[in-house]
Amino acid sequence: MLTPPEAAKIATERVHHGDHYVDNYEWMRDKESPDTLAHLHAENAFTAARTSHLSVLQEQIFEEIKSRTQETDLSVPVRRGQWWYFSRTEEGKQYPIHCRAPIADADDWTPPTIVEPAAGDTGTDAALTPATLPGEQILLDDNVEAEGDDFFSLGSFSLSDDGTLLLYGVDVEGDERYTLRVRQVGGSPAGSAGASASEADTVVRFSAADDLADEIPGTASGALLDATGKYIFYTTVDDAWRPDTVWRYELGTAAASAVQVFHEPDESFWVGVGRSRSGKYLAIEAGSRLTSETRLLDTSDPTGDFEVVWPREVGVEYDVEHVVVGTQDRLLIVHNKDAINFELVSVAAADPLGERRVILPHNEAVRLEGVDAFKDFVAIEYRREGLTRVAIAIVPKHGGRYEDIPHELKFDDELFTVGLSSNPEWNQPSIRLSYGSFVTPTIVYDYLVDDNELVVRKQQPVLGRFDPALYTQRREWATASDGTRVPISLVYRNDLVAPGTPAPTVLYGYGSYEISIDPSFTVGRLSLLDRGMVFAVAHVRGGGELGRTWYEGGKKLHKRNTFTDFVACARHLIDIDVTSSDRLVAEGGSAGGLLMGAVANLAPQLFSGILAVVPFVDPLTSILDPSLPLTVIEWDEWGDPLHNEEVYHYMKSYSPLENVHDVHYPSILAVTSLNDTRVLYVEPAKWVARLREVGADALLKTEMAAGHGGVSGRYDAWRERAFNYAWMVDVARDSSTSR
């Protein structure tokens, strides 16, 4: 019989607000300790042995994902400047390849295409060999850049306006710290860029040989080149890994010569830097979970001083977009001052604190999420009845008012997700959209504004015999303990799931940071649905599906609503015979992993298994320590237990680690990553050790070269997903079935 690793008990006492708590496993926090690493390796070996019977199923699911995915593929090109930018994937390669091809002329707004193999056609050589576009250039091949590293992530990708320089940032650890480099991709680089006209059909490939000497280590993501390509603006982090400082670096100088542009001293705020679509402004955005502040600088003066748009006011969040109305520069501002679901106003760029014209007033039934301004129109994103929406308003030509009623784009599905995709050009005549549902593979649309027409540019290919008509998506409503109605989205295969007959089911939940879990299609999920499983999403409070009040109802001293909502959703699915407690698996990751740990303690009898991915299961220890990554920032989400006794005891009442008790737990699988900087590996490691004390069947799997998002390569990610899915399929089997 397999014996799980036994973690040593070394008592560490935590004393706060008169409460004494003994933590026997805090010693695992020492990442460099041979004892910690030995324990994690032992846990991995135990998990591998305990799940060895699933190896065939895991391989089957992996092959299903692989066979349904068009491995050699091309994204829909996006125009920026004189080029169409796109990415490729090639069969057998883990990472995308970033490319571009020249536009035909100034009026060329139709993205170029290549002849792709028909869905289901896997037997031709054409499917294996990527066709190229005329004049194609490979700017960055992630597969080449990743050679020799177990992990690779791209955190910055910015081009100069003339398209001759590429700024990119690389992380090879998973800790979300990026090294910036600059590649010359125009002019006469060291590589093969000097192709003649006769070589127009030959793909030009840039490489590290074309990189300039400039290199900046230790940056956060989201760095950018200014319009001239002379300066790089980037952010760095403090000792708690909070992005807190914006820098300006001049190309061709020493990294140490970078000039500090802005520093945010408030530990609850983080900063980022960006640029308006119009190209007129650089922007520094500082924000907490409750408050934001934006500073602007005219791009014609990149060494000048950034000016505050609206001074920060506690509890007020706002986003800024530049628009030109007639000949006047104005700012469109989405804000929540006395408007909990946000409203849209317009102010003069020269006097942002002056007169505010209300463009879209506050609406209790509509959560306004953002606007994107273009030369001739504005795209508005919002949420109504739990679903995303997009509408278009025309910019007044002579300084008048916007259309009173923006034109909302209509879609037929009961459940769907729609949103803006990449739209970098100020003067583009169309808007790139992404649309999908649980049963509709992602569709890329261009909405032609003048013609009021949606044009399909591409639909996600699903190889094999995928028929969306075989699948049903629908919505249920559970009633929470306080009477609140909680939406549940479901998808299943019609011929394998019979109404009124309990089926194996995965219930997914998140419920934090106002993040919405919207209906979307994934190839991998078909491996569950085609085995007769139901996939359901519990849209619990703490998320943003039903507006800002829905979020407020699941944070700080209302956080338990997130957990009890999920339990109510589970009970509802059982009560209406969608599933049964011996066939129901709960799944969540990160803050959703906290949800998993909490419901494991609250209602273990409702579930046959719980999958917790990078789970935030020791929240009190983390949130009490300001030196840990992102802790102070998180106080606006969870409360401040360090200085507030009520918050301390409230968090302790639901903390998964502190509330493990002697009860029959369902099977539990915790998956984590050694280099995760958002939720440290130590949290699930401690949790699993504590669960074992009360006899729980708990497994721990640690990726030793990965970050918060798991492994980086797509094939590795598919294998990771296949492992998780195989485990869920196994624990969701009827208890009468042998395992």
Image (spheres, helix red, strand yellow):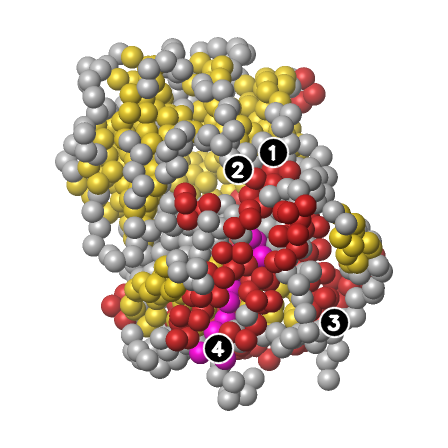
Percent x, y for residue 271? 56, 29
Q: Residue at x 33, y 15 (%)?
A: 355
Q: Nearer the viewer, residue 3 or 265?
A: 265
Q: Earlier in the sequence, mark 4 or mark 1?
A: 1
Query: In the figure, residue 426 lies in which quadrant?
Result: top left
The residue pinned by badge 3 equals 693
The residue pinned by badge 4 equals 581
Q: Is residue 324 above or below residue 90?
A: above
Residue type at mark 1 is Ser
User: SS of the residue at dot 4?
Assistant: helix
Q: Are marks 4 and 2 in contact (CB under 8 Å)?
A: no
Q: Quadrant of the C terminus?
A: bottom right
Q: Are marks 2 and 1 in contact (CB under 8 Å)?
A: yes
Percent x, y for residue 138? 46, 38
In space, the residues marked 2 and 1 are separated at their CA atoms by: 8 Å
Mark 3 surroundings within 10 Å by alpha-carbon count, few (fewer than 14), some (14 through 19), many (20 or more): few
Magenta part of the chain: 580-594
In space, the residues marked 3 and 2 are separated at their CA atoms by: 37 Å
In space, the residues marked 3 and 1 are separated at their CA atoms by: 37 Å
The residue pinned by badge 1 equals 268
Q: Residue at x 57, y 39 (%)?
A: 636
Percent x, y for residue 374? 30, 26
The residue pinned by badge 2 equals 289
Q: Nearer the viewer, residue 556 or 580?
A: 556
Percent x, y for residue 215? 64, 28
Q: Is residue 318 above or below residue 311?
A: below
In space, the residues marked 4 and 3 are separated at their CA atoms by: 24 Å
